[in-house]
Amino acid sequence: MVRGETDVSQRGAAESPAAHLKPKRGIGHWFLGLDAWLDTGLWALGSTLRRGAEAYDGFLRRFRARGFWRAMAEVASEGATWGLVGLAVMLAFAQPAFEATRHSDWRTTDDFAVTFLDRNGKEIGKRGIVLNDSVPLEEIPDGLVKATLATEDRRFFLHFGIDILGTFRAIVENARAGGVVQGGSTLTQQLAKNLFLTNERTLGRKIKEAYLALWLEANLTKNEILKLYLDRAYMGGGVFGVTAAAEFYFDKNVRELTLAESAMLAGLYKAPVKYAPHVNLPAARGRANEVLTNMVQAGFLTEGQVIGARRNPAQAVDRTQEQLPEYYLDWALEEVKKLSRKNPDLARDRIVTVRTPFDAALQKQADEAVSSVLAENAKIRDVDEAALVAMRSDGAVVAMVGGSSYGESQFNRATNALRQPGSSFKPFVYITAFMNGYDKNSIVPDRPLTIGNWSPRNYGRSYRGPVSLKLALTKSINTIPVRLAQAIGRKKIIETAYDMGLTHELEDVVTLPIGSSEVTAIDMAGSYSAFANGGYRATPYAILEVTNTEGRVLYNRARDEAEPKRVLPADKVAEMNEILVNVVEAGTGGRARIDGVVAAGKTGTTSAYRDAWFVGYTGNFTAAVWYGNDNFSSTRRVTGGSLPAMTWQKFMEFAHRDVELAPMPGVDPDTLPRFPKTGIATGPEQKTQPQLLNRNTQKALQEIEDALQRMAPQVQADLLQGSRPAGVLAPHEVASSAAPSASMTSMVGSTAR
């Protein structure tokens, strides 16, 4: 083959079809394409934004605001900036509230519907709430719906959950009146509070309320919101919703309500306790009249349409004789909620029946004892409030008085009020000392003592010198428990108090031994029960058994609770009981003495007479009684040995009628000395105000004294002659007969010292 032919064949091979195939692209080529696309897109976006910014800058260069308009633009710009910042901050505050909306059952929340029974199975009341859908919104009387809207939110169907105009109007009206006369919360905001929040008056709650109102408006229709509000609003008397309120106050179906009755119910939203018709019918009618005026002003009705309701106001069912144990029921409901947190079955069943150790007869006596003592002494002794808790020695609460009037204040002073116990705290010190080497006969000096800048002083500023612990506690000497605390250590006292049942924090300070740390009445009663039962912890309880709607037992105390724990040695309890019995028999608690019943206890009075206590017990019951004022103002020398001991005695004397008396651990009744109830005061806490004779009695006594003086010469003359007129006393007999009057005067004076 020639050279030229070889070159031609090689070129032909290079130009074959296989030589024209494109090479395969790998994944690297794909990423390169993606990178190119991103670069191009970002470049194009940047160019667009640059051109937009240049155009906006060019527009602003042509738009030059001056004077007023420039100021407005600046204000609007700053307002928008800070407004966005404020919204972000408020949204952060509202985040916890939105957690509640994540629950699928948020419409029913975690409230219970509880029917409470007494120890014999008789119904004593109800608490809690159940969403009542039995009456559709369309069947609720038009008058009730209009009364609700006219009173609570006239622009309900116009706003989006927050009524800006209404809020501004409320601010203006309140500023004019110098106080809160008009609320700014919409009906939706009120529902948000009822469903998810508490009644605390804080800025944080208002922020949460506003956001939740917007959430409700976004998730529910206006009619659904209105229906939920009518079902959920608290209407007083322990009932929720207009359906339950119609039955409670008027004993009729909500569909049958008249305009006057509808107006009275709508008036309850503002202050359900203050305007409850079964508590204060005149106030309820006055409020209903205001609601009728609101309906006319809102344009819902004319004056002619409401005149009949004005002239014929609603008449509520008389429930004054029912005397429900409201404070007890409130506390018992809280105990049910606590129990549900550790009982899975109860956490799932929300409609339950609870049997309690409540005793209706003892509750009635407790109410009467407190009310009678307050009625006789409130004004003259400057004391307005009282609390009483009574329980069996194992902690079963049988009666409770949380204040002078549930209608005026639902705050439960028996369970929630933290007050200084004064000398009623001293038994915790003494029992701790007994467990650390001391006994009732141990001698401790009662003399001046200074710890740092503080010097405890006894009542009367006097000192007895060396005294036994029995005498020291009987006479409520202050220096002795302070010395004991210095010797054994306050931490041991605090530990003992916690073991016995005190639940609130006790401050480790030098004044602790004489009762400076605050406690509750129910904790004091539970703690003293450890003395009554021989040394076992007695946690106060209100639940014996819980059953659901099917009758299944969800909780039984005897079955589900452990045996009580011993917290005090039996022999030390016996020593303490002997001393505390002596407090009642011969010490500061004399007014608590009960004929035929062994009673023990301790009085307590705080500085400036702000708090007065008597906590006492028998083998059957323990009761704590407190008197004082909610504003912590001083009473007029009310001591633990006066009103509290008197109230305790009135209650306990009744409680032990026709009851088999249980023995008090370590105390033999046959060895107790008995003193008359009216004996001269033996301790500082039994001092009382002088008992002044009225003018008529003083005048009569003066006339008797003048007559005796006129008769004396004639009597002496007759005696010299050896005769004596009938009915006339000899001089020595006159003196002896007059002596009781003098001694009585001395006794009255002694109680005033």
Image: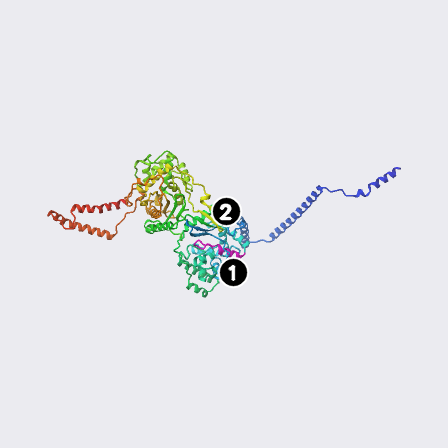
Would residue 379 be seen by someone viewing this image from the given angle? yes
Residue 8 placed where, x, y %? 86, 40
Task: Specify whether residue 59 is painted magenta.
Answer: no
Task: Specify whether residue 226 is painted magenta.
Answer: yes
Measured Cα–Cα span from mark 1 to mark 2: 37 Å
Residue 400 placed where, x, y %? 39, 48
Q: Of the residues shown, which amino acid type is indicated by label 1? A: Glu
The residue that disc 1 covers is 138
Please determine whether, in this image, residue 505 is positioned above or below residue 184.
above
Q: How is the image coloured?
A: rainbow
Which residue reaches farthest left?
A: 721
Q: Of the residues shown, which amino acid type is indicated by label 2? A: Asp
Q: Residues within 10 Å of mark 1 (few under 14, many from 20)?
A: few
Image check: 387 left or right of 10?
Answer: left
Frontmost residue, 722 versus 359: 359
Question: Which part of the image, by quadrant, shows the N terminus?
Answer: top right
The residue that disc 2 covers is 345
Question: Which part of the image, by quadrant, shows the C terminus?
Answer: top left
Residue at 16% across / 46% down in the picture?
731
